Image: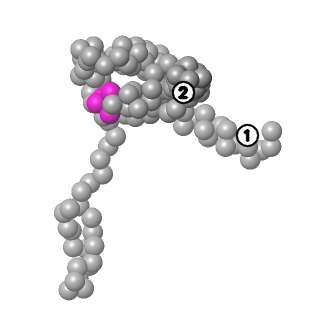
Amino acid sequence: MGKRKANSALRRAEANKERTYAILRNCPLSPRKVRLVADMIRGVEVNKALGLLRYSTHGCAPRLEKLLVSALANWGVKNPTKDVDSEELVVRTIMVDGAATLKRIRPRAQGRANRILKRSCHITLEVGTPFVKEKQGTKEQSATGVDNVETLK
């Protein structure tokens, strides 16, 4: 490996140490159905997200709950001095990507056949402290030409 690639690999590894995530691969659920529940818990505090998943009637909720618990355990390993309950952890990002699709055939009338697509997905869930929001006020030049006027958006 060249020096440039080695340096970029080290930078990626250092940036990855700050992230805490869990991945579920080849989950035999349709990505479209999982995204409904993923949108429900994205950006939500962890304890509230666990409650939402525990009492949800969606079929993918138990798998997402297990994935969230796994991400919390990973966070505990990376931060041994901190307590999961005392920290304000949120579901930072949750991505649902398509995976391999199994193609099956269903026999129909008069010798015809229909295709059945059994979809699967990859789910990536990242847990961490909430993102820091930047200050709302920005300095802009006003219409009168006066500089350093603070405007609030």
Q: Which quadrant of the structure image shows residue 146?
A: bottom left
Q: Check disc 2 and report its element: helix, strand or loop.
A: strand
Q: Quadrant of the C terminus?
A: bottom left
In this rendering, the answer to whether 37 lies above or below 134 is above
**What residue lies at 73% left-to-right and 43% top-to-bottom?**
5
In this rendering, the answer to whether 139 lies above or below 78 is below
Magenta segment, prevailing SS (helix, strand or loop): helix
- Span highlighted in magenta in the image: 37-42
Q: Is residue 33 visible?
A: yes
23 or 121, which is in the foreground? 121
Count of labels shown? 2
Give yes or no for residue 88 being in the magenta stretch: no
Horizontal side of 2 relative to 69 (left or right) equals right
Horizontal side of 31 relative to 82 (left or right) equals right
68 or 60, which is in the foreground? 60
Image x and y of residue 127, in percent: 39, 27
CB-based contact (under 8 Å), mark 1 and mark 2: no
Image x and y of residue 9, in percent: 67, 38
**What residue lies at 69% left-to-right and 42% top-to-bottom?**
7
**What residue lies at 54% left-to-right and 37% top-to-bottom?**
15
In this rendering, the answer to whether 39 lies above or below 132 is above
Q: Quadrant of the N terminus?
A: top right
Q: Which residue in the structure is indicated by mark 2?
A: 114
Q: Amino acid at mark 2?
A: Asn
Q: Which mark is residue 138?
A: none
Q: Check disc 1 and report its element: helix, strand or loop.
A: helix
Give yes or no for residue 41 being in the magenta stretch: yes
Q: Which residue in the structure is indicated by mark 1?
A: 6
Q: Is residue 129 visible?
A: no
28 or 68, which is in the foreground? 28
Q: Amino acid at mark 1?
A: Ala
Earlier in the chain: of badge 1 and badge 2, it is 1
